Image (spheres, rainbow, N blue to C red):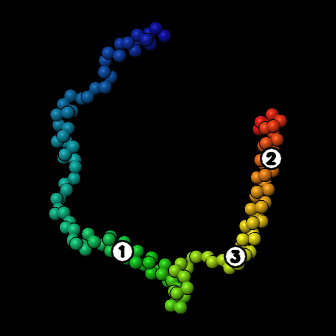
Amino acid sequence: MKKEVQDLDRLRMKNPFVVPEGYMEGLTSQVMSRLPEKSLSEPKRVTMIDFLRPWLYLAAVFAGLGLFVNLLVGKSGSEKNVTADSLFVQTSIPAETLSAMQTEEDAEYLEYLEVQYVGYILAEEMGNYE
């Protein structure tokens, strides 16, 4: 065990990696000689139509979607005067029935609140706070 510690101490001061003699002097020229020759061509010119093509495609998509929605949701000429929104739902419940339903529901709700409030008051009077 002691021998291993001594060997580590000896190696700690020394760099274990070695570069061959003269390796760095010719490195750049060797790498450049191995690269293939690349011809420099003139860059492609971007024409106006190449620049506008994605925007034209985008406009065509929106126009197509607009026509599709118009055909899908659109109305005939006789229905245009009925309502402005085809997704609007109209109810045909008479006002008297609607008010009667509201009063019955209101009465049930008020009765529920009264029971809850009375229970709360009685618990407070008896000292049972919940």
Residue 17 percent across, percent down from the top left: 31, 25
Quadrant in the rendering for residue 40: bottom left
Q: Amino acid at mark 1?
A: Ala
Identity of the residue drawn at 51% across and 83% down: 74
Q: Quadrant of residue 44?
A: bottom left
Mark 2 or mark 1: which comes first in sequence? 1
Give whichever of discs 2 and 3 has the lower sequence position. 3
Q: Which residue is mark 1?
A: 59
Near mark 1 (Cα within 10 A), the count class, few <14, some 14-19 or many ≥20, is: few
- Please tell me which residue is depicted at 26% across the width and 69% down the height of the picture: 51
Q: Which residue is mark 2?
A: 118
Q: Secondary structure at mark 3?
A: helix
Residue 122 image point, x, y percent: 82, 41
Return the residue nearer the eye: 26 or 82.
Answer: 82
- Tell me the element at label 1: helix
Q: Can you identify the residue that label 3 sits on?
A: 95
**Residue 28, relative to residue 71: is it above or below?**
above
Q: Give the camera-side residue of 30 and 40.
A: 40
Up-down relation of residue 19 to residue 63 (above or below): above
Q: Is residue 108 left or right of residue 25?
A: right
Can residue 72 be seen here? no
Judged from this view, the residue extending furthest toward the bottom is 78
Q: Earlier in the sequence, mark 3 or mark 1?
A: 1
Q: Would residue 42 be visible to someone looking at this image? A: yes
How far apart marks 2 and 1 lie (CA) works out to 67 Å
Q: Residues within 10 Å of mark 2 (few under 14, many from 20)?
A: few
Kind of residue at badge 3: Ala
Q: x, y (%) of residue 111?
A: 79, 56
